[in-house]
Image: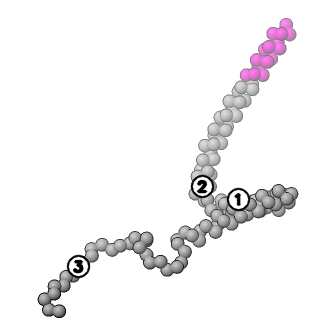
Amino acid sequence: MEGEAMAVVQFSETVNDPELVPVTGESSIGANDDWLLYAAAGTLVASGILLLTRNRKAGLAVAATGAALAMLDQQETVKAVWDAVPEYLGEIQGLLARVQDTVEEITAQGARLRAALGK
């Protein structure tokens, strides 16, 4: 094999692409997290069936369990809703104040109308 030239090539970067990891037969990352979603869905379906069959106490207990599991699965969503609650309460309080003012105004106008018709 005399006369053949050989070359050495140096790779300067390493490849850290998770898609290039060899398949080992194990489940992918995050697939095991779906059990909570399936458990929540299953308990909510079971609670619906119990409520339809007039098993109110058991249905409500299972529904509460399903809701708790769903909240565990959707922690980011629950946190976002919880953080928005004060803003919603402020808007509701403003709406109720406007309704109260309107009711008071209608009551005052009714009293004036009765007084005008009574004279």
Q: Which mark is residue 77?
A: 2
State whether residue 76 is above or below residue 35.
Answer: above
Q: Which residue is farthest left? A: 3
Helix, strand or loop at mark 3: loop
Q: Residues within 10 Å of mark 2 (few under 14, many from 20)?
A: few
Residue 16 position in % (x across, y down): 38, 72
Helix, strand or loop at mark 2: helix
The kind of residue tagged 3 is Val
Q: Would you identify the image quadrant in which residue 95 lies?
A: top right
Q: CA distance from mark 3 to mark 2?
A: 51 Å
Query: Which residue in the structure is indicated by mark 1?
Result: 67
Q: Would you identify the image quadrant in which residue 96 lies?
A: top right
Q: Which of 14 and 110 lies nearest the eye of the viewer?
A: 14
Predominant SS along the magenta part: helix
Q: Residue at x 62, y 51 (%)?
A: 82
Q: Residue at x 68, y 30 (%)?
A: 98
**Stretch of the chain drawn in magenta:** 105-119
Query: Which residue in the structure is indicated by mark 3?
Result: 9
**Mark found first going from the N terminus, 3 or 2:** 3
